[in-house]
Structures are given as C-alpha cells and as structure tokens.
Image (cartoon, rainbow, N blue to C red):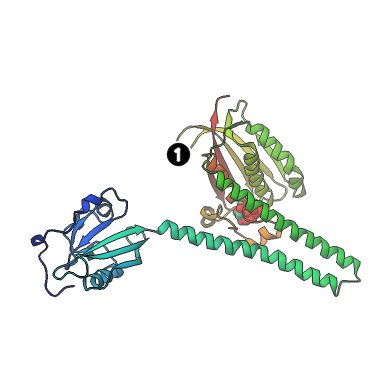
C-alpha cells in the first residue's frame, strides 16, 4: 500500500469501466489504497455491488492479486499471471494487470485488472492428459503380456505343444482385448464428434431390444441368466439412430450379465415416461439386474472413461471400462437421460429415457 494515501474522489478515474460492460471478463480499476474505484458489469457480478468504493481485499481473497497490484503500482511493468479464487466456488483465472497512466508518468496511478476464467480449459487439458495416460496404460499391459509369451514360446516352451496352445490362447485373448479397446475408443470419438448433430431416424425400440437380447442370450446362458423383456402393448417410436441405440442396450445388458448374480433374471422394462428435464413425452428403458450392486460413492463416476469399481474383475472379463462412457455420450447426443440406481446386495437399474414421436 502507498504511504501517502490519495483521495480517490479528488481525482477522476482515468477510464470509465462501464464502457466494458459488454465484455464477459471482469475488469476493475483499483487506486493506490486498493480501493475499487470502477468496474464493469462482469466484475460487479463476480464481486457484488458493495465492492464499488470498498477495499479490494474485502471482496477478493487473493494474496497473489494484492501482490500484483502493489508491484504494478510500484512501477513494475504489468503482465499476466494465473490466480486461484477460492470463493464463491474455486476457479482459476488468468490475471492481466497494468498501470494507468503508464510507467513514464509521475504522480498517482491506478491498476487496471482483467480476470479471464480459465477453469474449463484447465480442466479439459487435465482430462486430455489423463486420457492419454490411461490409454497408454491400458494398451501397455496386454502388450507386455504378449511380449512375455512370445519370449516363452521362443525359449522354454519351444518344444511343449500343450503349453504353446495354452499360451497362444491367452495371446489371442489379449490381442482381442486390444482390438476391443481400439474399437471402443473409435466409437467414443465418433459419438463425441457427432454429439451436436441430433439423430433423425424413427426407431422402434421393441425391435432393437429383441435384437440385442437375442445377441446376448448365449452370454447370459453361460451364467445361467435369463433375460425377460417387458414391453407395453403400444409403444411410440423414438427419434434416434438404431446402430447407436443397439450399442447402448448391448453395453447395459452386457454389464447386467457380467455383474449380475448367476442364475438370476435380468429384466428389461419398457415404459412410457416424461423426460426428467423437459417433461416431454418419452420412452424409458430400465435394465435391472440382481447382484451385489454398486456402492453410492462410485455411481456419479461410472460414466467416466476407464472408471471401474473393481479394475481386476472388469479386466479379467475383458472389459475396457469404456462401455458406460459410450452410453453416456450416445444418450447425450439423443438429448436423452441416463439414471443409475443401485441397492447394495439387492439390484441395480440403469434407465435410459429417450424422446418419443408419433408415428
Ligand atoms: N449392472 C452393474 N452392476 C454392478 N456394477 C456395474 C454394473 N454396470 C457397470 N458396473 C460397474 O461400472 C464399471 C464401468 O462399466 P463399463 O461398462 O463402463 O466398463 P466395463 O464393463 O468394465 O468394460 P467395458 O467397457 O468392456 O464394458 C464396471 O467396471 C463395473 O464396476
Ligand atoms: Mg461394460
């Protein structure tokens, strides 16, 4: 803070910040006593209207910003830096600060500050980095297992046809898992690219669901599981893309088979509904399986890429951890809704609601 306080009302502010009301970034002007002497609309929204004519530190809880103001008013050329504001919700900003009038002038000076919210871009950059790390990790483990078996087949197992057969089978499974991973990644990237284009076909869900249950019947039988499809007498069509919807229900019923109790029944229940957000008419499909269920703390994260409650178990079954991420994106592209409910030790239900249309 300056040792010689300047009475701000005596000096007209060098700029009218209301000229910057159209700007979405908060802009404000601070005098040598750290009093906010002017701000634009975005800064008013961020700090509140009491902030005008008040000391900045009462409204902005950031030592970094206070330090930058002191340095700028003290004659250091302004610049950019990153600051974190913990209130009201933690967000990252790029701070741009400069002195008014410029450094050559003598006498009182003001500091002009612009805050640009970079929380979303930081989050996206982190997600990209995590994603690449995850993909590399997921590919590395089958690859190193393949390399290990190749070495064994060339060395110790060279003259052991029985062991060779067993190892080749494991190698085939690992290679298949990598193929599945690549296919799932491609499917995910395709839905993400198309997410803003709404599908336009009219789709009959009863046909799709019968098709999917037929495909998965063999896998279900292996675990002694039956699939019961419960359809209403009359069913409106939904607006969608059949290949993508087949993928959604294949993933959901596939999970119910993998994670459901052996020798139980999976119920696929189709009902008329209202979409939760818009209250528009729709069709809800619930895939319900008996089983251990999913602890509540995992539920919000299940649709994240590679998120698995039990990594070892999912991998052991050849899972990639991308199934529900694909479901989420397809449902979002359809402007639909996905709900996950689970009662531990009893049952788990994944419900997809889609907009319906008159045929
Ligand atoms: N019906 C279910 N009951 C219990 N847990 C489930 C159920 N469905 C999904 N999960 C949990 O959610 C996780 C993520 O499911 P997701 O389908 O995305 O991946 P995955 O099944 O592991 O692999 P894949 O991508 O090959 O389907 C699973 O690993 C499992 O822990
Ligand atoms: Mg799955």
Q: Nearer the viewer, residue 63 or 107?
A: 107
Q: Residue furthest left?
A: 10
Q: Quadrant of the N terminus?
A: bottom left
Residue depicted at x 36% and y 61%: 93
Please rate how many residues cluster around mark 1, counting C-alpha atoms within 10 Å: few if below 14, some from 14 to 19, many from 20: few
Q: Residue furthest top?
A: 359
Residue 346 against residue 271 in the figure, above or below: below
Q: For residue 73, what is the image quadrant?
A: bottom left
Q: Nearer the viewer, residue 50 or 268?
A: 50
Residue depicted at x 9% and y 65%: 7
Residue 12 appears left or right of 222: left
Query: In the rendered image, which residue does mark 1 sit on?
Result: 277
**In terms of secondary structure, where does tag 1 sit?**
loop
Q: Nearer the viewer, residue 284 or 332?
A: 332
Q: Quadrant of the C terminus?
A: top right
Query: Can you give x and y, in whole percent of width and height, for residue 67 in the image?
Result: 27, 72
Q: Nearer the viewer, residue 68 or 212?
A: 68
Residue 191 against residue 81 in the figure, above or below: above
Residue 79 in view in this figure: yes
Residue 183 against residue 74 in the figure, above or below: above
Residue depicted at x 55% and y 36%: 354
Query: Can you give x and y, in whole percent of width and height, for residue 193 in the image?
Result: 56, 47
Residue 317 in view in this figure: no
């Amino acid at each position: 803070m300056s040792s010689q306080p300047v009475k701000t009302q005596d000096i007209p502010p060098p700029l009218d910040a209301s000229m910057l009301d159209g700007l979405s970034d908060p802009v404000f002007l601070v005098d040598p006593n750290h009093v906010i002497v002017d701000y634009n609309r975005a800064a008013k929204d961020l700090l509140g209207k009491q902030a005008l004519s008040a000391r900045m530190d009462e409204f902005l809880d950031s030592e970094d910003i206070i330090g930058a103001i002191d340095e700028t008013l003290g004659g250091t050329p302004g610049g950019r830096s990153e600051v974190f504001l913990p209130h009201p919700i933690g967000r990252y900003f790029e701070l741009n600060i400069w002195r008014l009038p410029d450094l050559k002038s003598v006498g009182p000076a003001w500091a002009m500050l612009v805050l640009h919210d970079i929380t979303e871009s930081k989050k996206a950059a982190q997600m990209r980095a995590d994603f690449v790390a995850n993909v590399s990790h997921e590919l590395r483990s089958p690859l190193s297992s393949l390399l290990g078996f190749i070495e064994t087949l060339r060395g110790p197992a060279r003259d052991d046809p029985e062991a060779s057969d067993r190892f080749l089978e494991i190698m085939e499974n690992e290679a298949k898992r990598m193929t599945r991973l690549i296919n799932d990644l491609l499917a995910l990237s395709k839905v993400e690219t198309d997410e803003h284009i709404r599908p336009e076909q009219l789709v009959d869900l009863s046909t799709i669901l019968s098709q999917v249950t037929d495909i998965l019947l063999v896998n279900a039988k292996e675990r002694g599981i039956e699939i019961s499809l419960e359809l209403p007498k009359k069913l409106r069509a939904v607006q969608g893309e059949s290949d993508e919807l087949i993928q959604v229900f294949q993933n959901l019923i596939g999970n119910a088979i993998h994670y459901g109790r052996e020798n139980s029944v999976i119920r696929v229940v189709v009902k008329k509904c209202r979409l939760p957000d818009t209250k528009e008419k729709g069709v809800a499909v619930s895939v319900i399986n008996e089983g251990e269920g999913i602890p509540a703390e995992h539920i919000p994260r299940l649709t994240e890429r590679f998120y698995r409650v039990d990594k070892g178990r999912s991998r052991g079954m050849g899972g990639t951890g991308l199934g529900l991420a694909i479901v989420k994106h397809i449902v979002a592209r359809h402007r639909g809704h996905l709900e996950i409910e689970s009662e531990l030790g009893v049952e788990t239900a994944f419900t997809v609601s889609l907009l319906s249309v008159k045929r």
